[in-house]
Amino acid sequence: MYDANHLISQLHAASKGHETRNFATFPARASVTFGELFAGAERNAAALVAMGVQPGDRVAVQVEKTIEAIQLYLGTVMAGGVFLPLNTAYTTPEVAYFLGDASPRVVVCDPARLSEMTEIAGAARVVTLDAKGAGSLTDSVVGRGGFTPVPRGPDDLAAILYTSGTTGRSKGAMLSHANLASNSKTLRDYWQFTSSDVLIHALPIFHTHGLFVATNVALFAGARVVFLSGFNADQILEAMPQATALMGVPTFYTRLLQDPRLTMDRAANMRLFISGSAPLLVDTHEQWQARTGHRILERYGMTETNMSTSNPYEGERRAGTVGFPLPGVEARIIDQGREVATHETGVLEVRGPNVFQGYWQMPEKTAEELQADGWFITGDLACKDADGYITIVGRQKDLVITGGFNVYPKEVESLIDDLPGVLESAVIGVPHPDFGEAVVAVVVAQPDAAISAEDIRAALADQLAKFKQPKHIELVPELARNTMGKVQKKALRETYAGLFSQD
Ligand code: AMP
């Protein structure tokens, strides 16, 4: 029976009539149709129930990106379980924290890590799935029959995603069936995805961007995906002439721009390039338009809220901004308890059906950030221009407070980035004996550019108030980023923590 609240029933219903069409194609294996995708998901659901998974039980998954892993996601949620994906880069002690916190019923891991996972899994059943889609999970799925989704209410959990956690322990963001279904359908409509689309899917599936934005939007639209195991410029450029859309983090775009095969001709069939998860440089936006004729559509979201704002599909996609609140989502920018005026900076808050159910087993943290009236304090600093376009200025935790004055890193970074010979920069605050914190700029020069710290200092002198000018400028070959393309400011702060220490 069709369950209108159930995320997977809705995704499955959206694929009706498409059963024999390809959902996923790959560079080097046979395609998978919509019918096969859901049949496999049903077999996974049946296997998980046989392993003891009951409604609300967590299924923790640390595996490579395969279509079998997507079937495991769909199957877990079909079985009433809560899908809990983990970054493949997490070490065993890190995974031990997540398993201890979430106490899953089943753990799925790569066969190479079976013995270490078994040691930390406690009472959970541990099964395996490898990068080719084989393993003891796949064995236990074989031969199972159809499965009717276990009924779920709109607020029941479908997934827990641990946040990347810039400070302290990662928190488990609880996402409901209604959170995920509403956001994916809104994005499908806003970005005009249909069954004619072919989406290049090169994002990881342990993160909201690749798992929910890319996969669920494609499924709700009945679109095909070119399913790549990760970012690979050759494979993306090869797929592009037959594809219509790409979802990426900014580093996808900067890396593709370095490839001379990226041309107007190659991008001629594409209708949409989307970027998010980290800020896209205005320069990248402009270069992309010059090379391909397309304006990248930048959107903003986070694990806790799914997607909240987007540049328009039709209408101006304004570089350096993340556009407007999505339909059904409200956004406001607050400083000292009131909404700020145009161009003023404050903390971005969002409210809507996209906003999560709270942090797993952290009621105090939840109450601090998710207010009783539904507004979620994102922790991102933002401002709005006269036309309502929102710009993300950076994380509140990255704000530098020097001598009692606030310095918004983005303001300094934008000026440095605009200097000839500069590729990009990161501005951080490090401990300073007099000022509390000192502004430090970590800068990457353009290849072959002969720019010095002195040149940068001189160029900023007339443009920035003295307190905003970096007290130290360090030129480095590149900025450390995580897999989602986010500059690791915490690591930078640690690296330069001793710059002004007196001992
Ligand atoms: P995550 O929960 O890992 O998806 O990280 C969410 C955070 O990424 C947000 O709170 C923002 O700080 C950042 N972020 C996401 N999209 C953008 C964007 N388009 N521009 C700037 N920052 C972004």
Image: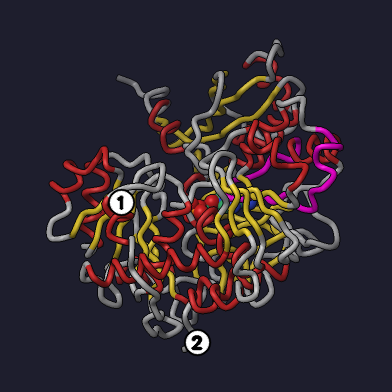
Residue type indicated by callout 2:
Tyr
Decide: is 63 above or below 477.
below
Mark 1 residue type? Arg
Taking depth in this image into account, of 448 and 114 the one nearest to the observer is 114
Q: Which residue is mark 1?
A: 169
Q: Residues within 10 Å of mark 1 (few under 14, many from 20)?
A: few
Could you tell me if residue 485 is visible in this image? Answer: no
Q: Quadrant of residue 460?
A: top right
Q: What segment carries the magenta color?
A: 263-283
Q: Residue at x 57, y 75 (%)?
A: 182
Residue 307 sits in which quadrant? bottom right
The residue depicted at 23 percent of the width and 70 percent of the height is: 50
- Residue 397 x/y as whole percent: 46, 49
Label 2 – label 1 distance at C-alpha: 39 Å
Residue identified by numbered label 2: 2
Image quadrant in which the C terminus is located: top left
